[in-house]
Amino acid sequence: MQHIDKADGAGEEFLAFTLGREEYGVDILKVQEIRGYESVTQIANAPDYIKGVINLRGIIVPIIDLRIKFRQPNVSYDQYTVVIIVDLNDRTTGIVVDGVSDVLTLSAAQIKPTPHFSGELATDYIRGLGSVEQRMLILVDIEKLLNTEELAALEAVS
């Protein structure tokens, strides 16, 4: 993993994407490519958020729909639906999102800590909140987004 020295003022780059009305950011170093949504080969007995697999230049890539994982209602697929191909724990994985907006460079001062919530709300996958002008991005640690059980399910379909 590449370490970025915060002292040089370069900041970190995040790919901004949308899920419903919320905007998220993922470390650009984890992103391999961005593609339009295409039909997938469904895998029997896979969790509902694993849409299936695609063959990406000879590599079988599981496709996870983050909209389903985040329990969004009325998930639909159209010409704007995007798959972000990411490196997830040394495993090429696709995540389905509503759209990709841009790449943003955030300084350490623009990244606020994750607020603490009481109860059962799991927020360990949130690195922090990025603030750029009037925009607020939920910065996601893509490798912590899936728990151990879900990672085992991914291994089973590949």
Image: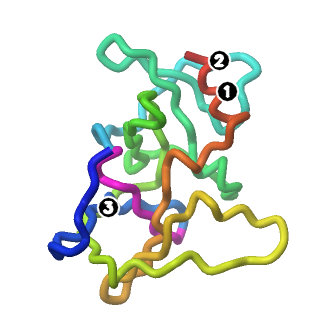
The magenta stretch is: 21-30
Residue shown at the point (66%, 55%) measured from the top left: 70
Q: Position of residue 153 (x, y in %)?
A: 68, 26
Q: Residue furthest top?
A: 58
Disc 1 to disc 2: CB gap under 8 Å: yes
Q: CA distance from mark 3 to mark 2?
A: 30 Å
Which label belongs to residue 14? 3
Is 87 part of what is drawn in magenta?
no
Return the residue at label 1.
152
Which of the pair 70/31 is nearer the observer?
31
The part of the image, by quadrant, that contains residue 120 is bottom right
| Nearer to the camera, 32 or 1 | 1
Badge 2 marks a residue whose secondary structure is: helix
Classify 10 Å Cα crowding around label 1: few (below 14), some (14-19), many (20 and above).
few
Left or right placement of residue 65 versus residue 152 in this view:
left
Residue 127 coordinates in the image, percent (x, y): 50, 65
- Percent position (x, y) of residue 28? 30, 52
State the residue lying farthest toward the right.
Answer: 119
Report the amino acid beneath label 1: Ala
Q: Main secondary structure of the magenta part?
A: strand
Residue at image location 48% in from the left, 35% down from the top:
89
Marks 1 and 2, how far apart in space?
6 Å
Q: Mark 3 to mark 1: distance in Å? A: 27 Å
Residue identifier under label 2: 156
Between residue 40 and residue 87, name the one nearer to us. 87
Q: How busy is the neighbourhood of tag 2: few (under 14 within 10 Å), some, or many (20 plus)?
A: few
Residue 14 lies left or right of residue 39; in this view the side is: left
Q: How is the image coloured?
A: rainbow
Which mark is drawn over residue 108?
Answer: none
